[in-house]
Amino acid sequence: MKYSDEEVKNFRVWGEFLKYPQCCIEWFCTEHYTERPEDSDYGVADGTGFLPCPACRSLCNTDQGLYNLLGRDIKSNQTYDIREMYKDTLGDMMSPRYKTIANKYDFDYTEYLNEIKAMWLTLNKEENK
């Protein structure tokens, strides 16, 4: 599967915003789908949204290793409520830091922001029925 240029920019922006290692961002944007077998195991990083590159994979085979690599605990992502995720994403995208990184990569995030807003509104409407 080949990503569009805008999708790759989006991945780079989020990778940098989330302070993922540059080698992992680069690997994800260029080799992820050609290298990852469907049954590959990312150990403790599975389900967190972070996919370590081959060089970092062995560094995060324990919770402590993952914490040491990223400098924070991301395991809580595994039980994240989808409505809260969209709400947090919207908040992140409105931050000056996100906008600075998006501009660095020449990523026009307006359309993406509108998609996230629409998904969040839809989920909240469904829950309030």
Image (spheres, helix red, strand yellow):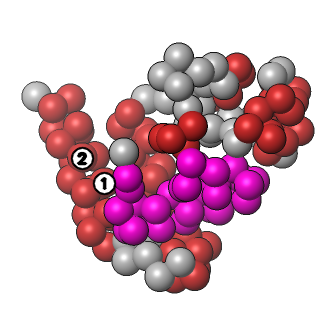
Residue 94 in picture, x, y percent from top left: 46, 69
The circle drawn on residue 60 is: none
Q: Nearer the viewer, residue 22 or 34?
A: 34
Quadrant housing residue 63: top right
Quadrant housing residue 40: top right
Whether pointer 2 and pointer 1 mark residues with C-beta atoms closer than 8 Å, the reply is: yes
Q: Which residues are magenta?
A: 2-31
Residue 54 in picture, x, y percent from top left: 74, 38
Q: Nearer the viewer, residue 96 or 52?
A: 52
Q: Amino acid at mark 2?
A: Met
How packed mark 2 is, by other alpha carbons closer than 10 Å (few <14, some 14-19, many 20 or more), is some
Q: Dominant secondary structure of the magenta stretch? A: helix
Residue at 18% over, 42% down: 122
- Residue to which mark 2 is pinned: 119
Residue 66 in picture, x, y percent from top left: 80, 33
How packed mark 1 is, by other alpha carbons closer than 10 Å (few <14, some 14-19, many 20 or more), is some
Residue at 56% over, 63% down: 12
- Residue to which mark 1 is pinned: 116
Quadrant housing residue 42: top right
Query: Which element type, helix, strand or loop, lies under badge 1?
Result: helix
Residue at 45% over, 53% down: 89
Q: Quadrant of the N terminus?
A: top left
Reply above or below: 67 against 30.
above
